[in-house]
Image (cartoon, grey):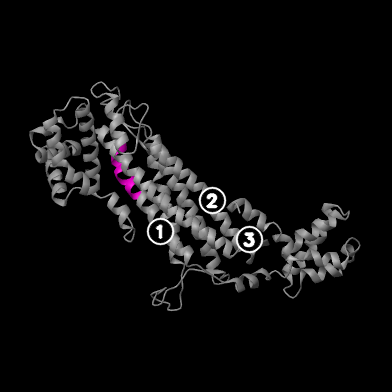
Amino acid sequence: MIPRYTRDVMVKLWSPEEKLRAWCLVEFYACEAWYKLGKVPKKDYKVIKEKLSPYMKKGFTVENIKRVEEIEKETKHDVIAFLTHLSEIIGPSGRYLHLGMTSSDMLDTAMAWLMKRAMEIIIEDLGRIKKILKDRAHEFKDTLMIGRTHGIHAEPITFGLKIALWYEEAKRNEKRLLNALETISYGKISGAVGTFAHVPPEVEAYVCEKLGLKPDPISNQIVQRDRYAEYMASLAILGTTVEKIAIEIRHLQRTEVLEVEEYFSPGQKGSSAMPHKRNPILSENLCGLARLLRGYLVPALENVVLWHERDISHSSVERVIVPDATTVADFMLVRLEGLLKNLIVYSENMKRNFNLLRGLIFSQQVMLALTEKGMTREEAYKIVQELAMKVWQDKTLNFKDLVVKDDRILKFLTTAEIERIFDVNYYLKYVDKIFERVFGE
């Protein structure tokens, strides 16, 4: 099901009215190509163009859709029903439509045009996400926080580095989407089994040029569905990146952490039972939709394998997964855009949490300093871990205090050297370099 609150532009793109408009464009341009080749008389071409121009510009109406559906009840074939209705609109000259074509010529070329436009919308969405990520990464470039591995405090990072990581992944997603856009932007007007027996390649080239597509170098009755699979895979990976960001926000918003929080608007309610609740509902929603988006990929992969020159098993699947997946992806990116733009960051809580382990996060630095001074790594690890475990078990102890009092360590390190070991700036000395690598600044 398509989310209710998604943008109108994507919903309109996949509307029945726009689908029929796409079909009409393919049929008209094919007819126009035949006219230029001398196959369609000028008077008939002029009638066809005059009758179809309003539909190609503004799309089809609800009445048109109902009429096609009415005809389809008898024909049991949607393309024939559509062509029959066009003939009703045009009159006798309508006989020059669909010359030498098979249904998939029209369907696959129209679908490529729609999928191309849908992907362009999604790429535009992602561009806005990248801009927000870049701005917020620089905003929090020096905002100290604790890095976590396995959910446990590890070593110092900044919140800006975390966002820069998301930005870099967004760049890779953009590259995949652009590749998928190129892969999907191919049409075919090659006839029943792709041999051009009844329609010359010139017609295909003309139609594709008019729609901003390229002719598929070779097709059978259909454009090959590995193209669709790549397209859907790029959306699935995009959704996983969105989930990755969303689940991080969910973790950081937990009450015990509360380093970031989704914006909670005036009058917003978090729970029907507990008036105090401020839940990360946007992030949770995005995590759920990512599962849905990934679910569309498997049917797309299975659609690659068809009988001989084609069967129709892919058709019913694509009528669902392509409109739904692109609409869900668009909805997710628009929602993520607002979430990131309005995300509240609690830097004071980041500082508070940073000190929760009372200096244990500097353990690697102590161990490395001891090994540099001549102690074996094994002995250094043993001593540092021994002190660290005491701090874990006794909440009144501080790791640095134990280090400066341990005779085994003082044989190798001076008090001044130990002081430098516990300087957090040591861990952040390459932040500017990392930002330069990511943002090119």
Query: Please, what secondary structure does the residue beneath circle 1 have?
Result: helix
Amino acid carrying mark 1 in the image: Val
Which x, y percent locates residue 339? 46, 64
Residues packed near mark 2 inside 10 Å, few (<14), some (14 to 19) or many (20 plus): some
Q: Answer yes or no: is residue 368 visible.
A: yes
The residue wearing badge 2 is: 169
Residue 297 x %, y %: 41, 44
Which residue is more in the foreground, 424 or 209? 209
Depth check, mark 2 against mark 3: the one in front is 2
Horizontal and vertical percent for residue 210?
Answer: 29, 37
Which numbered disc covers residue 350?
none
Q: Residues within 10 Å of mark 3 (few under 14, many from 20)?
A: few
Position of residue 54 relative to residue 279, above or below, is: above
What is the three-letter code of the residue carrying label 3?
Arg
Q: Quadrant of the N terminus?
A: bottom left
Q: Residue at x 16, y 47 (%)?
A: 65
Residue reaching furthest to the right: 411
Residue position marked by numbered label 1 in the rendering: 334
Q: Earlier in the sequence, mark 2 or mark 3?
A: 3
Alpha-carbon distance for marks 3 and 1? 29 Å
Can you say whether 303 is above or below 139 in the image? above
Q: Secondary structure at mark 2?
A: helix
Residue furthest out toward the left: 92
- The stretch of residues the image draws in magenta is 314-324
Q: Please give the label number shown on residue 148.
A: 3
Side of 438 where 94 appears, left or right = left
Q: Residue at x 45, y 53 (%)?
A: 126
